[in-house]
Image: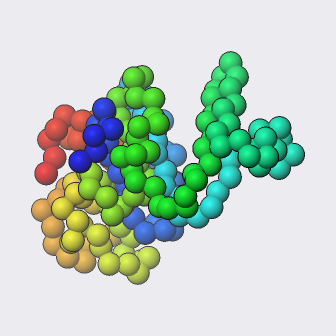
Amino acid sequence: MLTNAHKPILGFAAYSGVGKTTLLKKLIPLLLENNIRVALVKHAHHDFDVDKPGKDSYELRKAGAGQVLITSANRRALMFENPVSKDPVLDDELAYLHQEDIELILVEGFRHESFAKIELFRPAAGHEPLYVDDDNIIAVATDAELPQPTTLPQLDLNNPQDIATFIRLQFLAGNHP
């Protein structure tokens, strides 16, 4: 159970290279057009850095500051150095999210955790579908016929408007499996 999710949370589950980020870049503006403000949590499977060598914030963090808050009139970024290198847990990460001004939390990744997800499935990618073994998948967005039958709603992976409509009229309204 995601105790730190104070707004509806919807994930996008797929193997790497299927197009999660590409879809989300198109989907988020469509949701905003419908006055659905979103926050996004993205799981990175590798070491990443949002700061650049030579910048003051980078140098101060590398000098040993465990937290660095960079703030301006337009945005704020808080970087934490995890004292122990371990895979993040979604519910723990949600505690850092400012949820007061949003209607929906979208999640890219964390596919092995238990929360509602839309699977992005491209048969040409050569992976087995996730919906067969994951009861948290509430719909499948695909670009071809599915290899195994399902009663789940099937969405057009190449039509972000179709997916935005499902989120708005089915997911947010509570009308999903």
Q: Residue at x 33, y 63 (%)?
A: 112
- Residue 90 in sight from this viewpoint: yes
Q: Residue at x 55, y 58 (%)?
A: 84
Of all residues, the one furthest to the bottom in this rendering is 126
Residue 87 horizontal/vertical position (percent): 47, 61
- Residue 158 in sight from this viewpoint: no
* Pick the front one: 13 or 65: 65
Q: How many marks?
A: 0
Indicate left or right for 107 with 54 as reference: left
Q: Residue at x 46, y 42 (%)?
A: 40
Of all residues, the one furthest to the right in this rendering is 54
Residue 132 horizontal/vertical position (percent): 21, 72
Indicate left or right for 53 with 18 as reference: right
Query: On screen, 166 above or below 125?
Result: above
Indicate left or right for 166 with 34 as reference: left
* Pick the front one: 161 or 56: 56
Q: Residue at x 74, y 46 (%)?
A: 64
* Pick the front one: 135 or 1: 1
| The quarter of the displayed image where residue 173 is located | top left
Color style of the picture: rainbow
Residue 57 horizontal/vertical position (percent): 77, 38
| The quarter of the displayed image where residue 102 is located | top left
Of all residues, the one furthest to the top in this rendering is 73
Residue 63 horizontal/vertical position (percent): 79, 46
Query: On screen, 41 above or below 121?
Result: above
Query: On screen, 14 above or below 81?
Result: below
